[in-house]
Structure formats: structure tokens, C-alpha cells
Image (spheres, rainbow, N blue to C red):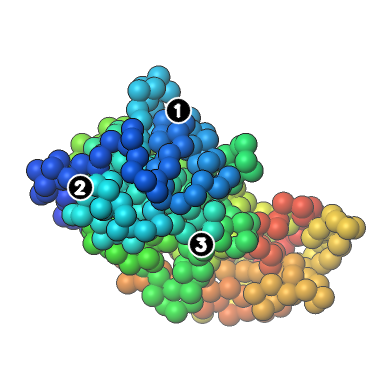
């Protein structure tokens, strides 16, 4: 019998610097609570909403004046995510300090010096601090990030593990705002939509350099991990994966909905619920990272492994949809096997300005990741019994119309066309693939 090595998710976790301070410096902080902002010192301004007062040392621009409306619009969305009735938060209120000159806030007793050394933002109790940013988007992002911490601290206290706290704050801080409507929890279409955010760039660079962490190592993050910027990117990626993948989404929603009994318990509970699928999840995580970039569409781009794939012992024929990402064939092959692939079918890559019809070899007028757009791709995936040292991108073969291929990795055959997942929505048509050992 083969031994399955399960991840060691039970580790000594504390929540964040704020909670360390809450444990160890509560007396000091109580003595240094910020002055109530009813009468502001010279040089400070305040704008208020239903749930927030925003205090700043900058002249009030339109972008600063709208921050309370942004925050108030986030409240019902936070409540929906964390299973909180809106009535439960009616009396909740927070002060947010948007700081150009940090020392002015310390001098005005708006910022306790004991917690003044953060770089971007901080949450403690019913107060948030955000340093001024180079874009209005990223200023809002930090406010919503710290606001998510505030909501989670209200619900979970000090019981949520660091990856969950920071991953959810990153997920719900990433947003769209048109001046009237707020959408939390987006995957940006491009970098211009989220100036200075940069999370997918970190992920793809570290994946290409062979230093992308395993999913388990992210779940084991300690309170000091997020002193490094990449930890925010990977915590965000873990939340994107667990929230959207069909093998984990229901379990993840239950995790957010329940009260957390302990920081270690949250990870222990998550693993217990997913333990049978964990070897498969490791590979599905690798596949997700390969596609996780601007415009990523989870409902189209998440690879899943068949529950009971059969060994390829004779000729088989399958059909794949040009509008979906990786699609399982249902057949496994062993490393070293030579297989024959023949693909046919006409499909459409785009509808505008006119339908762009093509075939399994794709179109050489445009390339994506070094291959013609629309070319048929193949990979093999198998459960990973041991936790890998690092996450690795899929090994992909561009098969096009077909040929003979020596399989280098045992696993289930998966197929898709070569196109970013965010661009698959306007495709139509199918490809028929004949496979023979």
C-alpha cells in the first residue's frame, strides 16, 4: 500500500503584528489611544460616512471625499462573504487615518508610536491607518484591505491564521469603483485597472524562477511571513484557488461562515475536510498558477482531475470546447508511452470585429506564450503524493493537428486551446481529438 504524505498544517501560528501587540502591549496602547477626532488640530480634515470617519492631513480632493462612500458600499459585501447579518454591524464604526506625513499623526496623538513602523497600512481595534499612495486606486485598495481586517477581527477575534487574514484582505481589497458602484473581490483585467498592485507579476516571476511556494507552505505562514511583499501575493493566490476551485469552494465557504476556535484549528479543520483530495489539489494548484494572471477567469480556467480516469489501452475519441480551459480526457498514460494524436474541427477564437475561424494548429498571425493563438495543447497531470518543495508550472506540449508524442510524465491527459483564460469567453466551437497508444 502506498503511503500518502499529508501536509503538516498544524503549526504555531499567531495572527498579525496587531494581535501580538494586543497580547503583549495592550496596556501601552491603551495609554496611547488616538485622540478623538471631534475637534481636529490645525492641518487635519475629516469626512464621514455611515460606518467610517476618514481623517487626513491632506487637502480634501474629490478622491478623498469619496472614501467614506467606498467604505460604506463595502459593508454589505463584507457581511455577505463572512456570513454576518447587516443588522449585526449597524452600530459598528471605524476611524481611518490617511497619512501623508506620519509624524504629524504621531504628534497629534492620532497614531501610537508603538505601532507606527508599518509600511503601508495597519488595523488595530476600530482604527485603521493608511499611508498616502501614488494612485487613488491603491489608496482605496489599502483602505479596503485594512477594512477587511477590521471586519474579520470583529468576527473571528485572534483566531484566523495569517494566510487567511491577509489573503482575504488582498482578495476583498482588489476592487472596481466607478464613483457610484463598488465591486469587491475581482481579478483585474490588466495592470492599468489596478496601478501599483502587482500581485500576478510576483506569482508568475517566482513560478518561472522555480521558487513558487507549495500550497501547504502558504497555509503554514507565520506572523512574520508578511514582512515580505510576496507573502501577500501568495496568500491572495491561495484564497483565489480555494474560493473558486470546484473541489474546494464549498469547504472554503464553510470555513469563512463558522466561528474559528483557534488559529491552528482553522488549518486543521480545512485539511481534515480536504484530506482525501489533497494529493490531487497539489496538482490542480500547480495548474491554476500556470494561468493565474491578469484577466484570469476561474469559472473557465480551473483544471480538474477525473474522479476515476481509465488507462488508455486502445483508440479513443474525445471532444473539447474551445471556450473552456483545461479539459480532462478521462484517460491516463504512463511515462515513456508513445501516443498518437489527431485533432480536427473548426472553431472561432473571437467574434469582433468579425468571427476569426481557425483549426487545431491555431493562427500564426498572433502568438500567446510562444505558440500560435488557438493551437491545441496537451498536458498530463497526476496526484502528488508528497508535498513538493516548490510549486511547478505544467509541462505542456503543443500538439496542434497532431502527431506522435512520447509521454514524459504519467497522469491523466488534459487538452485545451492556447489562449489566455480571460479571452476564452467569446470563443465557440469544438475540437474532436483521436488518441491512440
Q: Position of residue 32 (x, y in %)?
A: 17, 45
User: Which residue is painted at 78% across and 71% down in the image?
Assistant: 362
- Crowding around mark 1 (Cα neighbors within 10 Å: few <14, some 14 to 19, many 20+) is some
Looking at this view, is 10 or 397 the one in front? 10
Q: Which quadrant is the C terminus positioned in?
A: bottom right
Task: Point out which mark residue 140 bears.
Answer: none
Callout 1 secondary element? loop
Q: Is residue 393 visible?
A: no
Identify residue for label 1: 50
Q: Find out whether the residues at labels 3 and 1 contact each other: C-beta distance under 8 Å.
A: no
Q: Position of residue 10 (x, y in %)?
A: 20, 53
The answer to which of marks 1 and 2 sits earlier in the sequence is 2
Identify residue for label 3: 134
Looking at this view, is 430 or 366 the one in front? 366
Identify residue for label 2: 19
Q: Can residue 105 be seen in this view?
A: yes
User: Which residue is painted at 63% across and 79% down in the image?
Assistant: 405
Amino acid at each position: 500500500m502506498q503511503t500518502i504524505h499529508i501536509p503538516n498544517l498544524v503549526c504555531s501560528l499567531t495572527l498579525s503584528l496587531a494581535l501580538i501587540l494586543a497580547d503583549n502591549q495592550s496596556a501601552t496602547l491603551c495609554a496611547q489611544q488616538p485622540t478623538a477626532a471631534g475637534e481636529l488640530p490645525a492641518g487635519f480634515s475629516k469626512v464621514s460616512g455611515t460606518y467610517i470617519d476618514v481623517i487626513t492631513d491632506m487637502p480634501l480632493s474629490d478622491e478623498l471625499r469619496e472614501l467614506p462612500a467606498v467604505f460604506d458600499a463595502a459593508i454589505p459585501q463584507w457581511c455577505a462573504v463572512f456570513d454576518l447579518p447587516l443588522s449585526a454591524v449597524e452600530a459598528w464604526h471605524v476611524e481611518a487615518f490617511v497619512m501623508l506625513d506620519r509624524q504629524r499623526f504621531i504628534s497629534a496623538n492620532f497614531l501610537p508610536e508603538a505601532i507606527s513602523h508599518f509600511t503601508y497600512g495597519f488595523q488595530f481595534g476600530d482604527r485603521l491607518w493608511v499611508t498616502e499612495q501614488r494612485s487613488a486606486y491603491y489608496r482605496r485598495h489599502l483602505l479596503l484591505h485594512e477594512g477587511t481586517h477590521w471586519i474579520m477581527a470583529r468576527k473571528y477575534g485572534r483566531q484566523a491564521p495569517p494566510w487567511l487574514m491577509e489573503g482575504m484582505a488582498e482578495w476583498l481589497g482588489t476592487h472596481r469603483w466607478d464613483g457610484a458602484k463598488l465591486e469587491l473581490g475581482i481579478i483585474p483585467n490588466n495592470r492599468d485597472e489596478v496601478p501599483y498592485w502587482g500581485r500576478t507579476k510576483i506569482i508568475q516571476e517566482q513560478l518561472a524562477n522555480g521558487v513558487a511556494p507549495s500550497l501547504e507552505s502558504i497555509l503554514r505562514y507565520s506572523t512574520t511571513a508578511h514582512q515580505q511583499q510576496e507573502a501577500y501575493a501568495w496568500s491572495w493566490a491561495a484564497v483565489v484557488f480555494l474560493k473558486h476551485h470546484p473541489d474546494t469552494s464549498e469547504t472554503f465557504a464553510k470555513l469563512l461562515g463558522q466561528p474559528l476556535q483557534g488559529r491552528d484549528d482553522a488549518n486543521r479543520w480545512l485539511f481534515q475536510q480536504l484530506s482525501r483530495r489533497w494529493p490531487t489539489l497539489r496538482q490542480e494548484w500547480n495548474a491554476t498558477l500556470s494561468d493565474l494572471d491578469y484577466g484570469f477567469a476561474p469559472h473557465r480556467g480551473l483544471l480538474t482531475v477525473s474522479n476515476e480516469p481509465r488507462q488508455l489501452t486502445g483508440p479513443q475519441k474525445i471532444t473539447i470546447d474551445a471556450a473552456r480551459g483545461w479539459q480532462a480526457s478521462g484517460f491516463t498514460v504512463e511515462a515513456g508511452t508513445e501516443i498518437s494524436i489527431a485533432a480536427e474541427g473548426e472553431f472561432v477564437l473571437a467574434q469582433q470585429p468579425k468571427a476569426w475561424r481557425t483549426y487545431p494548429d491555431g493562427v500564426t498571425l498572433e502568438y500567446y506564450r510562444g505558440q500560435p493563438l488557438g493551437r491545441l495543447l496537451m498536458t498530463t497531470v497526476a496526484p502528488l503524493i508528497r508535498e513538493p518543495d516548490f510549486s511547478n508550472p505544467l509541462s505542456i506540449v503543443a500538439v496542434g493537428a497532431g502527431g506522435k508524442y512520447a509521454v514524459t510524465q504519467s497522469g491523466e491527459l488534459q487538452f485545451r486551446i492556447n489562449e489566455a483564460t480571460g479571452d476564452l469567453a467569446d470563443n465557440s466551437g469544438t475540437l474532436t481529438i483521436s488518441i491512440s497508444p
